[in-house]
Amino acid sequence: MVREAMRWIAVCAALVPGCDRLRGDDEPAPEQTSKAASTPAAETAPATDAKLEPEVVPPVVAPAITCPDGGTGKGGAPPSAHELWCETVADGKPVRHGRWTRWYEGTTQKWQEQDYLQGKRDGHALSWFENGKKSEEGDYDDDEKHGRWTTWAEDGSKKEEGEYKAGKKQGRWTDFWPNARAREETEFEADVESGSYVEYREDGSKALIGSFQAGKKHGTFTQLDAAGKEIARSEWIAGVQQQTPSAPTSFACPEGLTSKGTPPPAGTEAWCENASAQRQGPYRKWHDAGTARIAMQGDYQAGKKHGRWQEFYASGDPKEEIDFRDDKREGEFAGWWKNGQKRVEGEYWSNKRQGVWRWWYDDGQRKLEGEYKRGDKQGEWESFYSAGERESKEQYEDDLRDGKGEYWHDNGKPSAAGTWKADKKQGAWRFFDENGRLTDESIYKDDQVVGRPPRRRPEFRKPQTD
């Protein structure tokens, strides 16, 4: 065997200069070898009795978490990390199993805490604001919300409370004013508004009474002043407002306020004002005087939008709904397509987007989903093609792409993958055609191509011999 190896080296050296000096992958590179290796023996430094100390390898510290069923702790807690969870293997893949905790980056304040069972959310769930106050609390069963759930505002006041059944709202749900009084009560059936509906003012008086059927306004909607007196009424059938063109539209102001504008059939806008000429109380705008279909409605308080505001398509179907407080968007926001499909939903805090926001195509397919933190995109964002295939998955920090980016063609094949830093491409990026074949690899710095990844050194193989 030794003789055969020597023969191969001689053949290789004759064909490829320096072949006899080829090194293995486990040998140090030439620039890493000692000077003594290339120095004549007479110039070699004298040997000493000094011994090289072995390299000290720091021990691997397991995350401080107790995991059920022999699971493994992953991640870490502040200050070194901000996400800690338990993991096990199911069907050959790692899945969360046990407690998962996430902290606000750079702090010791918890953001979210949740129990998992074989990769599915199961058990109690809690989330907090950065100021330490709770933002949401409830339970999951088989990865779906189940039982009573409560959400709070950043100041600690309760915002919403109700029951879920298999991930869908069921029964009476209540929205609250900051003073803990009910702002809105809605009956749900399998996540769809169905039954009585009541809106309240901050003082507890009823402002609007009506009902829903299959998610659409149905029946009589009556607007009341603070004393309980009827000031406006409209009839609805399956979400379509019923209005006789020749009949005058009912609009009245609460006692002590002056009516302004002109409602149908002579005009298309009406509101109320207080003694200081500020808008106060109900406001209505109609699409046109002839049909008297409401385009927008809401309330003012001392000249500022306050409470629930709604916009409608000419068909009478809802277009947008949002709550205001002191002229700023505050609370849940929802928008719909003309065909009645939900277009967008999310939440505002002091006029800024906050929490999870979702968008849909007009056929109900998911379009975009991600999280905001005080108006800035934060964390993972996903987009989808209209057919349902994933289009992109990106990481954001302070409204800028920061972290791994993955992209797909509409046939599900990868189209690109790489890393973002402050919204600019950084490092190695790979690009693929619609068949998933690699078409380009480039090294980026601040969004500019600066090179190509180094190619692997080809392996030398022994020539075939007879």
Image: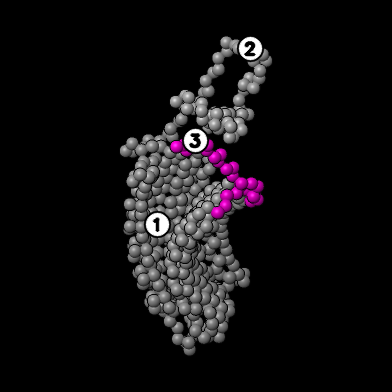
Q: Amino acid at mark 1?
A: Glu
Name the amino acid type tagged 2.
Answer: Pro
Closer-to-camera residue (207/165): 165
**Left or right, 328 with reference to 228:** right
Q: Secondary structure at mark 3?
A: loop
Quadrant of the rendering where the C terminus is positioned? top left
Near mark 3 (Cα within 10 A), the count class, few <14, some 14-19 or many ≥20, is few
Q: Residues within 10 Å of mark 2 (few under 14, many from 20)?
A: few
On residue 462, the disc is 3
Is 417 on the left or on the right of 236, as rendered? right
Which residue in the protein does label 2 denote?
A: 46
Q: Label 1's element? A: strand
Q: Which residue is located at x 36 percent, y 47 percent?
A: 119
Q: In the image, is residue 116 above or below residue 200? A: above
Q: Position of residue 464 (x, y in %)?
A: 47, 38
Residue of label 1: 161
Which comes sooner in the sequence, label 1 or label 3?
Answer: 1
Instruction: Tell me how far mark 3 sits from mark 2, CA to CA.
Output: 40 Å
Marks 1/3: CA–CA distance: 74 Å
> Mark 2 falls on what kind of element?
loop
The percent position of residue 142, horizontal first and vertical second, equals: 33, 52
Question: Which segment is the magenta one?
Answer: 439-466
The residue furthest top is 49
Among numbered discs 1 and 2, the one appearing first in the sequence: 2
Task: Give the CA separation, mark 1 to mark 2.
Answer: 82 Å
158 sits to left or right of 123: right
Q: Which SS does the magenta portion mostly show?
A: loop
Query: Which one is in front, 444 or 132?
Result: 444
Residue located 41% across and 43% down the image: 100
